[in-house]
Amino acid sequence: MSFSSSKSSLNNSSNPSNSLEEGIFNSIGLGSKASSLNRNSSLSTTENSTFSFVTNILTGIIVVILIILLVINGLQYYFGINVIEKLKDLFSKKPQVEIKMVKRDDKEDDEGKDDDDKIIKIIRKPVIKQQVFNIPGNYFNYTDAKSLCKAEGARLATYSEVEDAYNNGAEWCNYGWSEGQMALFPTQKTSYDKLQKIEGHEKDCGRPGVNGGYIENPNLQYGANCYGYKPRMTKEEEDLMNTSTPYPKSEKDLEMERRVNYWKTRLDDILVSPFNYQSWSRV
């Protein structure tokens, strides 16, 4: 009984000493510093972890980019495949054409094909889906029209193909030889309605729909309706598309055009009056 009491008194006597030590450490700031050190150590560990994570992500991205570049350059070097150009063609509205020079001879190969057939397949590389396209001008008989379409890497379009082109918005006011010795051209109703309001041009482009039909004389000269991969538009064709009228010009229209062109060449000699006596132009 006395032993327990003395042990209890010893424990109680040690507590004030511990409290005293803590008070001394706190009074001189060691306690707060120790706590601060612990917090700083924890923050440093977190920052290091975050930095390591970001570094790993950036390293991974750089490695992926290098692999992609190696693949692109490898395809270009070993197989001649330009991946960048392929992607451009995929998202471009205008087709791209690859041109390769081929030495021509008159000998046929084992398949019975001469160099004309080979050249057509090389320079007319498929880059967009096949479609009907018209070659204008009344210059070709039926046989020539067939040959012309073949030279373009295509063939004469059928009536159904011309009709399908019409249903998708195609129109050209020009007869074109088509498969089955037919001469056809499509006209949209909106264009037909506009022509009805222009004096002298009401009947220029037929009626809405697919115009034409079978032509008994194959020697008559028309344009050509081809079906295949349409060639890339040239600068001249782009200018013509932007400036031409949707109907043939009458003699009156041509005369007016000649007079306009005449005065365009003499504009530097023409004086223009001011807006009033104080200013050149309206403000």
Image (cartoon, grey):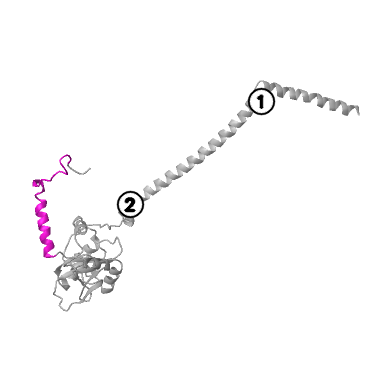
Disc number lying in front (2 or 1): 1
85 vs 1, left or right, is left
State which tag comes first along the sequence, 2 or 1.
Answer: 1
Look at 40% across and 48% down and name the residue there.
Answer: 67
Asked whether the viewer can see residue 108, the reply is no
Look at 68% across and 23% down and name the residue there.
Answer: 26
Would you name the residue on which mark 2 appears?
84
Would you name the residue on which mark 1 appears?
31
Q: Secondary structure at mark 1?
A: helix
Q: Nearer the viewer, residue 34 or 178?
A: 178
Measured as percent of width and height from the top left, residue 33 is found at 62, 25
The magenta stretch spans which residues? 250-279
Which corner quadrant of the image does residue 177 belong to?
A: bottom left
Look at 57% across and 35% down and name the residue there.
Answer: 45
Kind of residue at badge 1: Gly
Q: Secondary structure at mark 2?
A: helix
